[in-house]
Amino acid sequence: GDSLAGYADAGYLSDPHNARSQTGYVFIHSGAAVSWRSTKQTLVATSSNHAEIIAMYEASRELVWLRNMTGHILRESGLAVGKEKEEPTIIYEDNAACIAQLKDGYVKGDRTKHILPKFFFTHDLQKAKEVQVVQVRSSDNSADLFTKSLPTSTFKKLVHQIGMRQLKDLQ
């Protein structure tokens, strides 16, 4: 549709020498990428799940900024209709364990005690209906473009999915 949607992914230990993982995210509006990032995580993630939660945290912070900015533009330009609450923005994520943990929020258990509570920001946003985290197959996760090398067919599909077209396709 013509609303905002995001994709988040982590590449666990993409830099094994420094024990760092990769965060990747991309936000799409009206079929085109409007914001994207591929960055090395500054924190050492202790599991792929931990890396995914950090990636979701970073994507969620960007999302809050994007929602505020688009809301501001709509209000200033007179395009915002009435006072109705914005719909939650969907962030697609392919890691089921990460999604489950973000649904439950910060629970101090053996599996999460090493994860800082601030990384559960996404959970708070879900409770506030700003965000809805939805599971997507890894092969459909656009953010994978920013975290790992992909088979050519998947790469081409995801590049198309974020609105990139070759000149020959446009003529």
Image (cartoon, grey):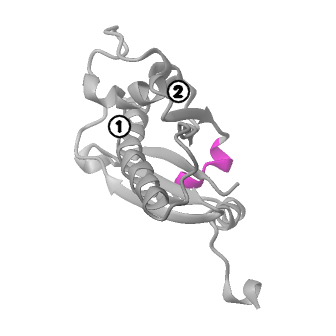
- Quarter of the image holding residue 30? bottom right
Say few, some or many: other residues with alpha carbon within 10 Å of mark 2 (under 14 / 14 to 19 / 20 or more).
many
| 164 on left or right of 48 | right
Residue hosting label 2: 99
Q: Residue at x 46, y 22 (%)?
A: 127
Please tell me which residue is depicted at 39% across the width and 50% down the height of the picture: 68
- Point out the image quarter for the C terminus: bottom right
- Residue 75: image x %, image y %? 46, 56
Q: In this rendering, would 39 be left or right of 91?
A: left
**Residue lying at 65% horizontally and 60% vertically, measured from the top left:** 158
Q: Residue at x 32, y 47 (%)?
A: 16
> Along the line of sight, which residue is nearer the eye, 80 or 33?
80
Q: Secondary structure at mark 2?
A: helix
Relative to 12, 156 lies left or right = right
The residue lying toward the viewer, choosing from 141 and 117, is: 117
Rendered position, 88 above or below 36: above
Q: CA distance from mark 1 to mark 2?
A: 12 Å
Region in magenta: 138-144
Q: Along the polypeptide, which appears first: circle 1 or circle 2?
A: 1
Q: Which residue corresponds to mark 1?
A: 54
Amino acid at pointer 1: Ile
Residue 100, image x and y in percent? 52, 20
Of residues 35 and 49, the one drawn nearer to the viewer in this rendering: 35
52 part of magenta stretch: no
